[in-house]
């Protein structure tokens, strides 16, 4: 089972949940740190680096000036403005390039080929019985998704894995969540936490993925996150109390389950709840199933197939239909 | 020097998320009342509006790039698009029809250009919206990115450009920008060309690790950088260490903010910390003074 741990807001405890969940599962578990801009899981799962870091590159254009006649077709085609033609010479801006290969294909002179440009590394760390695979984006590189895909490509074909996602709701998050089985959204009971949780919920609903919520620092704010989850029929999988000892252990880079064994049970229960939520163990979580039918009755998914990229209104409420449940892979669109 | 160039912009970033960027930015907005335009560049997960309660004056669709759409009646199901797509966005459905997954499509246009049947349309993509608002502190520019949409960096640049235009138009000398976490595309878009960066960090192993990367980024773009440690008393030794590291890398240390549960209480009341009598308000004021933006 592949579980992604995500959140809209940063600093809510994604990494804490990911590393402690991996740790209570123990032997054979693989943790993938997909927060390649700021990978942190290795600070908590200390261990030996296995082999050399593997460099990851994307393909960017290289122009053969002896063949190029400066016609400018490549720069007119490029959707990312990664090529410009000045005085019949092509300038390449590799940091803008998405690596689509289009310029190479449209060049009438065959003057463009692709050369690798390094964007970061993937490293494997053995930490006790766990394996940590992490991406580390080179500083100054803008494009995280190709590196995230490289990290995910090293995921074992079978067995369990936990993915630590980056914060936010845009492309790096989507690249992480795609093709996972279940999403754990970590939030905190504050207005910022609630607002960003709603955004994250809109994303997982758009991706039609099953998900549940972990409330971190429970008791530090108000009860509106729990109310929201109840109203939306979103299962609250666990609540991690607001305990200064947790913050202090975290600050030192310790696992909660080691530093404060009383919380071990909490993460074991969370694992069980995740498995039930996914339904892959044959005993689907009853409240979730009820949530499915209630939601379908309450909010028919009218017009969704034709909808363009759904917009969010200003207060963070999703304008998307409130489908909280997976109904197969993301619906594609066909104009008729 | 043109009017535009005289305007100073302080961008608040953090590397690690959740260190208190937005709480600090909201307080700065209040302290700069009447002198600044506020820009919320955390377009992925914007929160500043929850404190500053903006009244939206104007809201504009953010269209950026295009997306490929297969026209079913023209498609011959040759499969070339699926072969060409580098983003895995072309899917074959069980009934042998090709379709584009809009979330995976990066809008490069390769399939559109090379489809032998001309069966792929390329409409403009709606990626979100941006807003110009009025708050109790002054004008604010903010945005929200569409669900699972792309091009957050472009939206960030747009928000900043608009903030600068308004500052220029209204003769305001300062822009207070709340940045996104991380070090990637939206962060780079938030800080390039800014006059000053403030990194809000926390004394944790993650805070320390991420600070190093974000300072490296600031040096890469050659922007004067200050650092303040939030919740410093959670781990005083680490705070010391972080401050020494920050200074060694050429950043200025502009103070510490204490761990204060009343920060959350302020947030719940939709107030900036400096609008309450939370003990940490004093610390934030002192950071603001040290930054010398008065």
Image: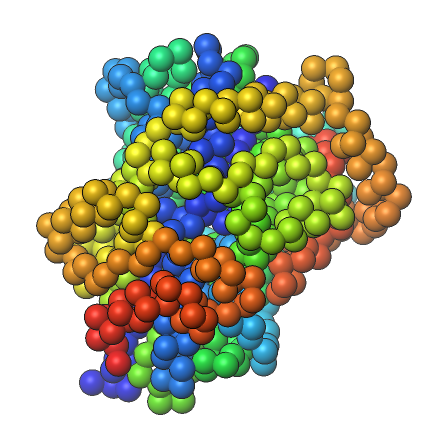
The percent position of residue A248, horizontal first and vertical second, equals: 36, 38
In depth, the one of B251 and A82 nearer the eye is B251
Give the number of marks. 0
Residue A78 seen in the current view? no
Front residue of B57/A117: it is: B57
Q: Nearer the viewer, residue A301 or A114?
A: A301
Measured as percent of width and height from the top left, residue B272 is found at: 46, 69
Is residue A10 found left or right of B293 in the rendered image? right
Q: Is residue B19 left or right of residue B92?
A: left
Q: With A41 as the anchor, is A48 left or right in this view?
A: left
Q: Residue at x 18, y 54 (%)?
A: B219
Q: Quadrant of residue A319?
A: bottom right
Quarter of the view holding residue A76: bottom left
Q: Pinpoint residue B80: horizontal percent, then vertical percent.
A: 58, 33
Residue lying farthest to the right in this orientation: A297
User: Where A210 falls versus B54 (above or below)?
Assistant: above
Vertical position of residue A283 compared to residue A8: above or below: above
């Amino acid at each position: 089972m592949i579980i992604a741990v995500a959140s809209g807001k940063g600093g809510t405890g994604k990494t804490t949940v990911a590393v402690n969940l991996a740790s209570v599962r123990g032997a054979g578990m693989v943790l993938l740190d997909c927060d390649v801009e700021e990978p942190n899981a290795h600070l908590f799962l200390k261990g030996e680096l296995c082999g050399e870091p593997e460099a990851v590159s994307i393909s960017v254009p290289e122009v053969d000036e002896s063949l190029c006649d400066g016609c400018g077709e490549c720069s007119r085609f490029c959707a990312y403005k990664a090529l410009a033609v000045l005085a019949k010479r092509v300038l390449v801006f590799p940091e803008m390039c998405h690596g689509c290969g289009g310029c190479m294909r449209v060049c009438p002179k065959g003057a463009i080929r692709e050369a690798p440009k390094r964007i970061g590394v993937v490293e494997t760390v053995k930490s006790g019985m766990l394996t940590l695979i992490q991406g580390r984006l080179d500083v100054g590189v803008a494009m995280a998704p190709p590196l995230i895909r490289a990290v995910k490509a090293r995921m074992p074909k079978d067995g369990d894995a936990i993915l630590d996602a980056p914060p936010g709701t845009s492309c790096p998050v989507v690249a992480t969540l795609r093709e996972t089985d279940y999403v754990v959204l970590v939030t905190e009971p504050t207005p910022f936490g609630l607002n960003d949780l709603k955004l994250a919920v809109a994303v997982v609903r758009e991706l039609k993925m099953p998900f549940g919520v972990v409330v971190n620092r429970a008791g530090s704010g108000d009860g509106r996150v729990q109310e929201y989850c109840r109203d939306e029929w979103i299962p609250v999988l666990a609540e991690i109390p607001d305990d200064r000892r947790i913050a202090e252990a975290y600050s030192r880079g310790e696992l909660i389950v080691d530093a404060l064994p009383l919380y071990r049970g909490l993460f074991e229960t969370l694992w069980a709840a995740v498995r039930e939520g996914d339904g892959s163990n044959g005993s689907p979580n009853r409240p979730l199933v009820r949530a499915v039918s209630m939601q379908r009755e309450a909010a028919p998914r009218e017009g969704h197939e034709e909808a363009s990229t759904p917009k969010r209104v200003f207060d963070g409420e999703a304008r998307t239909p409130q489908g909280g449940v997976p109904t197969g892979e993301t619906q594609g669109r066909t104009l008729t | 020097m043109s009017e535009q160039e005289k305007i100073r912009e302080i961008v608040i970033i953090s590397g690690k998320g959740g260190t208190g960027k937005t709480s600090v930015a909201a307080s700065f907005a209040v302290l700069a009342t009447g002198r600044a335009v506020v820009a919320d560049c955390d377009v992925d997960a914007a929160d500043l509006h929850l404190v500053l309660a903006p009244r939206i004056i104007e809201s504009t669709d953010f269209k950026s790039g295009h997306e490929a759409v297969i026209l079913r009646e023209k498609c011959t199901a040759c499969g070339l698009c699926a072969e060409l797509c580098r983003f895995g966005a072309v899917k074959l459905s069980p009934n042998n029809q090709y379709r584009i997954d809009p979330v995976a499509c990066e809008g490069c246009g390769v399939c559109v250009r090379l489809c032998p049947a001309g069966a792929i349309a390329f409409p403009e993509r709606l990626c979100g919206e941006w807003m110009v608002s009025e708050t109790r502190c002054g004008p604010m520019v903010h945005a929200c990115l569409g669900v699972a949409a792309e091009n957050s960096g472009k939206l960030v640049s747009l928000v900043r450009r608009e903030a600068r235009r308004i500052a220029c138009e209204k003769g305001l000398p300062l822009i207070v920008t709340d940045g996104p976490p991380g070090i990637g595309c939206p962060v780079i878009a938030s800080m390039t060309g800014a006059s000053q960066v403030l990194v809000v960090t926390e004394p944790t192993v993650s805070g320390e690790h991420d600070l190093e990367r974000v300072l490296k980024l600031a040096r890469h773009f050659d922007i004067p950088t200050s650092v303040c440690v939030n919740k410093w008393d959670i781990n005083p030794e680490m705070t010391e260490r972080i401050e020494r590291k920050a200074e060694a890398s050429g950043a200025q240390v502009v103070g510490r903010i204490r761990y204060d549960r009343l920060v959350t209480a302020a947030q719940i009341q939709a107030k900036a910390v400096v609008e309450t009598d939370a003990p940490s308000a004093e610390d934030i004021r002192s950071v603001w003074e040290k930054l010398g933006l008065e």
